[in-house]
Image (tube, rainbow, N blue to C red):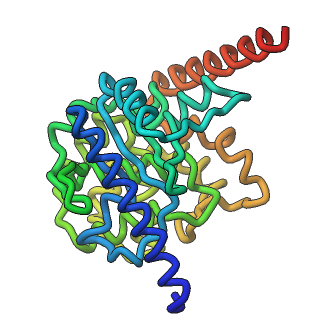
């Protein structure tokens, strides 16, 4: 990265760090615990502050604290991003996004992804979380195994068709922290994200040179028929993995079900998506009358 580009990256990240610390401190003053997600949690021993591109601040709160956190942020002058066309779908998929007065985006999460896609207990994430400091403010970050699995899930959520950070983050983290692989395999099974973990870890190995034991990849890989279907659309040798970038908008339709481990997940996912879309259609029809 050139010196001007690195300086711009540094300035952007410092602004995000200051905004993130301000929001975390504000929520902590109202007894709301926060876990940092993605890039913000890695700007310590994984990346220097000018090495990792960031576009927003991702914060996880317990589901029972979600509405209280929303009121605190609105009361502090942050502006809610309102998706008028699909409000229920946006809330389901993206939780809530806010504009900070300094120009930063703050994403508030109560889960990693849409309900029904994965079997993750958020309270257990908080119980395993590690202490972290953000600009002098005490907060939390996910434990290493939860961080890796969250990045695996995030890759399948929206990043297969574009060059982003999840796979690089995994490779970089594996090179700097020690992972209990047996626990990771067990937890991936409990979360029902074995396929997502297999895909992301294999990419981290093949594209960025990460080291993952072969026994782990064998334990995580899906059955042969689903592997063959995924191989039609996804490469294990490139990032982004999606082979047909001109079909990028269709990748979720093509891959969504295949990336889930069980039939129950797929049924719950379809029901949830259809329910949200129908609710949005009803809302638009009411608004139009």
Would you place residue 215 above or below residue 100 in this image? Answer: below
Q: Quadrant of residue 81?
A: top right
Instruction: Identify which residue is drawn at 35% across, 51% down.
Output: 37
In this rendering, position of residue 85 left or right of residue 187: right
Residue situated in front as seen by the camera: 114 or 221: 114
Instruction: Give how far across and how far down residue 227 sits, in percent.
Output: 53, 49
Q: How many marks?
A: 0
Q: Residue furthest right?
A: 289
Instruction: Identify which residue is drawn at 80% across, 12% down.
Output: 285
Residue situated in front as seen by the camera: 141 or 219: 141
Res 92 visible: yes
Instruction: Give how far across and how far down residue 15 sits, in percent.
Output: 43, 65
Q: Residue furthest bottom?
A: 3
Instruction: Give how far across and how far down residue 127 sits, in percent.
Output: 15, 37
Residue situated in front as seen by the camera: 123 or 117: 123
State which quarter of the image contains the C terminus.
top right
Instruction: Identify which residue is drawn at 49% across, 34% down.
Output: 95
Residue situated in front as seen by the camera: 122 or 220: 122
In this rendering, position of residue 285 left or right of residue 267: right
Instruction: Identify which residue is drawn at 36% across, 61% down.
Output: 18
Q: Quadrant of residue 42?
A: bottom left
Res 125 visible: no
Would you place residue 250 above or below residue 95 in this image? Answer: below
Instruction: Give how far across and how far down residue 52 sits, in percent.
Output: 43, 71
């Amino acid at each position: 990265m050139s010196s001007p580009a690195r300086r711009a990256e540094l300035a952007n990240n410092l602004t995000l760090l200051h905004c993130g610390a301000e929001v975390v401190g504000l929520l902590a003053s109202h007894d709301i615990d926060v876990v940092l997600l993605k890039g913000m949690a890695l700007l310590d021993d994984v990346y220097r502050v000018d090495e990792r591109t960031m576009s927003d601040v991702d914060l996880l709160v317990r589901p029972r604290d979600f509405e209280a956190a929303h009121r605190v942020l609105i009361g502090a002058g942050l502006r809610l991003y309102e998706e008028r066309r699909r409000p229920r779908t946006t809330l389901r998929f993206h939780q809530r996004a806010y504009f900070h007065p300094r120009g930063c985006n703050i994403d508030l999460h109560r889960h990693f992804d849409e309900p029904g896609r994965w079997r993750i207990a958020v309270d257990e994430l908080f119980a395993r979380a590690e202490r972290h400091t953000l600009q002098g403010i005490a907060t939390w970050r996910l434990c290493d195994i939860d961080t890796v699995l969250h990045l695996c899930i995030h890759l399948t959520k929206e990043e297969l068709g574009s060059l982003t950070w999840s796979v690089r983050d995994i490779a970089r983290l594996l090179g700097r922290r020690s992972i209990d692989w047996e626990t990771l395999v067990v937890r991936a099974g409990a979360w029902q994200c074995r396929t997502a973990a297999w895909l992301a870890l294999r990419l981290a190995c093949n594209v960025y040179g990460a080291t993952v034991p072969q026994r782990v990849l064998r334990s995580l890989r899906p059955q042969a028929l689903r592997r063959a279907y995924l191989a039609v659309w996804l490469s294990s040798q490139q990032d982004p993995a999606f082979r047909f970038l001109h079909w990028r908008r269709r990748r979720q339709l093509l891959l969504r079900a295949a990336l889930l481990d069980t039939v129950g997940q797929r049924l719950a996912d379809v029901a949830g998506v259809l329910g949200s879309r129908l609710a949005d259609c009803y809302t638009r029809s009411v608004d139009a009358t």
